[in-house]
Amino acid sequence: MLKINGAAKLSILSALTLFFSIAITAVPSASAKTHYHDFVVQATQVKRLCKTHNAITVNGQYPGPTLEVNNGDTLVVKVVNRAQYNVTIHWHGVRQMRTGWADGPEFVTQCPIRPGGSYTYRFTIDGQEGTLWWHAHSSWLRATVYGALIIYPREGSSYPFPKPKHETPILLGEWWDANPIDVVREATRTGGAPNISDAFTINGQPGDLYNCSTKDTVIVPIESGEMNLLRVINAALNQELFFTVANHKLTVVGADASYLKQFTTSVIMLGPGQTTDVLITGDQPAVRYYMASRAYQSAQGVPFDNTTTTAILEYKLAPCPAKGRGSAVKPLMPSLPAFNDTPTATAFSRSLRSPRKVPVPTHIDESLFFTVGLGLFNCPPNFKASRCQGPNGTRFTASMNNVSFVLPSSYSILQAYKQGISGVYTTDFPAKPPVQFNYTGNVSRSLWQPIRGTKVYKIKYGSRVQLVLQGTNIQTAENHPIHIHGYDFYIIAEGFGNFNPNTDPSKFNLVDPPMRNTVAVPVNGWAVIRFVADNPGKHPEKCQSYFHQLFIPKLLTRMIFQPAGAWIMHCHLDVHITWGLATVFLVEDGVGELQSIQPPPADLPAC
Ligand SMILES: *[C@@H]1O[C@H](CO)[C@@H](O)[C@H](O)[C@H]1NC(C)=O
Ligand SMILES: *[C@@H]1O[C@H](CO)[C@@H](O)[C@H](O)[C@H]1NC(C)=O
Ligand SMILES: *[C@@H]1O[C@H](CO)[C@@H](O)[C@H](O)[C@H]1NC(C)=O
Ligand SMILES: *[C@@H]1O[C@H](CO)[C@@H](O)[C@H](O)[C@H]1NC(C)=O
Ligand SMILES: *[C@@H]1O[C@H](CO)[C@@H](O)[C@H](O)[C@H]1NC(C)=O
Ligand SMILES: *[C@@H]1O[C@H](CO)[C@@H](O)[C@H](O)[C@H]1NC(C)=O
Ligand SMILES: *[C@@H]1O[C@H](CO)[C@@H](O)[C@H](O)[C@H]1NC(C)=O
Ligand SMILES: *[C@@H]1O[C@H](CO)[C@@H](O)[C@H](O)[C@H]1NC(C)=O
Ligand SMILES: [Cu+2]
């Protein structure tokens, strides 16, 4: 490898990436474009917190390249693996209609791209607008392998809010002063909790409150009177985060690439995987303000990274002595909620509403109830004590409906499904918990140990699904950000304690619930989501107004082309997915060609 310093290497590679990233237009229809990109996954020297690490990056950039498309465009991304680890890339929140082979989670929709290998992801974004992101979906590589995916309105249409003067992606990340792969491997070996991170980052930089970081703090410029759209992404591995900007109100306009009814707040909370688009206006005295992010920690008595990352919102007319990095005049610091401020987190998530009445399915074909939470495995007899460093000589685990999910290793689940290969998974994931208990009470120790398995839940094409996600108080109760691949869903209610099927349905919002791809299930509480796979022609809602017509293309695509495939649903705290907090929905093909998954690409990696 060439011996050039980290910064120089990063900038050379950025230039190369820029060259490769220039979109080549294929023009399949009047306005939809095809964007071609090359992603080279490689070890790159990255210096943070006074120390240089050989971080795995895409094209030498940390965070990785920002992808920009219009709703309706196609992305073709050739991923070349020049790193020493298996890798896959997931396009978080992209529906992948009929292109399930491009979804990315390793051993679910594909075998990993091995060192030296490559794979081209090809998919169309249809009916989604706002902010998504992409990240590695293999071990803990996404700690450094991630970037923004920005979806502008369809060519010729515009935002349902005044066009902001500037737009800024704000990627919240998590940094270990170690190799994150070593951290997860150590935890898997010992059975204990992995080491906590050493910093959070904004666009890859920890900011002024950390050692050796001030000279690289991110500066976001703003002009008096201007509006800036901040596209905030929680790309942290294991931590839910509060985000705020000193003295500025945040007007929330969207989340997870769906628009929202606008509302104003001073702080937002994002679970890993979630995105939130907020407008800020340059309506404050022209000086400098910190934007800051730190943990929302719902689990009690557990170590966590309690540091604060900052960037600087700098007015262009700020007086000169106060400008620039490391200036003596400190920017104004916002106050952040307390780490355990669940009421603030809850108030925020309860404020989210779709902009108008939405077609929430009311007839339910599949009524599911899944518990989500942690657990402990007793030390297996053949294990040394050093491998059982969880509480009281156990090993940490996590489960849904008492099944701790184990990834296959010889075939991906999708491959096994489509090619009829048996022995890779079983279809007996339970629709409800095998044992009913007081999920959020003092759970008897005899219930703490789940079973291990590669159990999937099969759904018929066209099913209307309601899923109650019930957090448990096993070992430690915690807010779990649950993400479903291939689907957006309506979050129709959430609450604390045990879901009550007799009284809680009266709280369902079947009018204007928010649509998301990741739901933060309240600590020691529950959330109810609905998603649908209607057959063509059974569109449930008539267009009532011009405004509706504007949004009909989005609804139509969502209702009709419900994608078939193998869709993993998992907690987006990577430590919990490592421990098995996941399952897979196996959705059968419909009858027509447009209701079936496309054939696998020729370059799909083999195991
Ligand atoms: C985890 O932290 C412990 C204690 O600080 C340290 O000894 C160990 O090396 C760390 N592990 C990794 C993989 O960084
Ligand atoms: C910065 O470095 C000093 C001296 O090594 C150390 O005591 C302190 O904890 C560090 N601060 C942070 C935020 O890491
Ligand atoms: C963060 O945690 C450390 C170690 O537990 C503690 O010493 C420190 O006071 C905490 N800092 C804050 C801001 O809570
Ligand atoms: C561990 O053992 C101690 C003492 O026997 C007990 O008080 C504690 O509840 C146990 N913890 C767990 C997690 O089982
Ligand atoms: C469950 O346990 C909690 C905490 O002990 C208690 O407040 C609640 O009443 C229990 N619920 C039921 C249904 O027993
Ligand atoms: C929880 O239940 C166990 C027995 O099942 C009991 O020993 C313990 O005291 C209880 N803890 C609380 C906080 O009620
Ligand atoms: C999970 O299954 C194991 C094995 O059958 C059992 O011991 C345990 O009690 C179950 N726990 C729950 C919460 O169902
Ligand atoms: C890499 O992927 C192959 C399958 O393609 C698998 O056999 C191997 O165990 C993986 N390596 C690691 C370190 O996970
Ligand atoms: Cu979790």
Image (cartoon, rainbow, N blue to C red):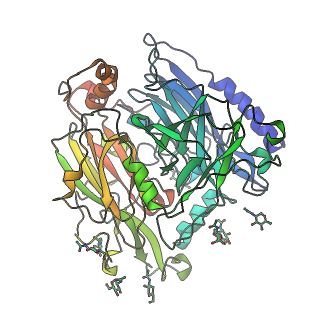
143 or 438, nearer to the observer: 438
Residue 487: x, y in percent?
35, 40
> Looking at the rendering, in which quadrant would you find the N terminus?
top right
What residue do we see at 21% from left, 41% from top?
A: 464
**Visible in this render: residue 563?**
yes
Which residue is the extreme one toward the front? 285
Residue 146 seen by the camera:
no
| Residue 536 or residue 265, whichever sits in front | 265
Quarter of the rendering containing residue 379: bottom left
Q: Which residue is located at x 53 percent, y 53 percent? A: 242
Q: Is residue 403 above or below residue 516?
A: below
Q: Nearer the viewer, residue 605 or 192?
A: 192
Pick the front one: 31 or 287: 287
- Residue 106 left/right relative to 369: right
Is 169 rendered above or below residue 582? Answer: above
Q: Is residue 162 left or right of residue 352?
A: right
Residue 77 percent location from the top left of the image: 54, 30
x, y (%) of residue 287? Answer: 72, 40
